[in-house]
Amino acid sequence: MRSLRCAAGVAAMTMLGACRSTASAADVPAVIDPPPDVASRAELREAVSTLLGGRSVLLADDALTKTSLLILERPRRRSIGGVFEPGRELEPPERFRLLGSDGRCVLVHLNTGMRHALTKTRCRAEGDEAKRG
């Protein structure tokens, strides 16, 4: 009985590994390359906004050009006089990962799993400096 459970466990682990390696071969963490132009920055801002349900966002010009991870903190609340209100933020930050395959880019909202294709933006595998040009 014990060997049967062990064999079933090994088979399940092998299948899981195969699925995981297939998925990672298609979608790998990526960065925007070449550096983004006005159209690709606008597309990225629109994609993030869409994945956040239409909320307005402010992104740096070099967002997702050095790392595949984008983390957006919520703005801290200010009093009428402009002073930050005391207290802590209880909601987690919004996290995104840029994935790519064959120069194509997909932005994934890690908090929800929702995906958004970026058609005006090219990307390369993160850490793949040899293909940069």
Image: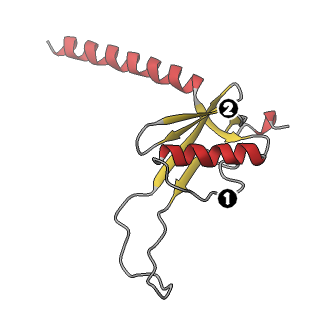
> Residue 60's mark?
1
Seen from this angle, which residue lies furthest bottom? 81
> In the rendered view, does 25 fall on the left or right side of 8?
right
**Closest to the observer, 7 or 40:** 40
Residue 36 can be seen, yes or no? no
Question: Is residue 60 positioned above or below 78 on the image?
Answer: above
Q: Residue at x 45, y 19 (%)?
A: 19
**In the image, residue 75 lies at what x, y percent?**
49, 68
Please tell me how many numbered marks the rendered image carries.
2
Instruction: Please identify the quadrant where the C terminus is shown.
Output: top right
> In the rendered view, does 23 fall on the left or right side of 88?
right
Q: Residue at x 49, y 54 (%)?
A: 55
**In the image, residue 115 lies at what x, y percent?**
50, 34
Q: Residue at x 41, y 45 (%)?
A: 111
Return the residue at label 2.
Answer: 119
**In the image, residue 90 lies at what x, y percent?**
34, 65
Q: Report crowding for label 2: few under 14, some 14 to 19, many 20 or more residues within 10 A (C-alpha).
A: few
Quadrant of residue 101 within the rendered picture: top right
**Closest to the observer, 115 or 71:** 115
Q: Report crowding for label 1: few under 14, some 14 to 19, many 20 or more residues within 10 A (C-alpha).
A: few
Please, what secondary structure does the residue beneath circle 1 have? loop
Residue 37 can be seen, yes or no? yes
Marks 1/2: CA–CA distance: 20 Å
User: Is tag 1's residue or tag 2's residue first in the polypeptide sequence?
Assistant: 1
Q: Amino acid at mark 2?
A: Thr
> In the rendered view, does 78 fall on the left or right side of 67?
left
Q: Nearer the viewer, mark 1 or mark 2?
A: 2
**In the image, residue 110 lies at what x, y percent?**
46, 43
Question: Is residue 6 positioned above or below 68 on the image?
Answer: above
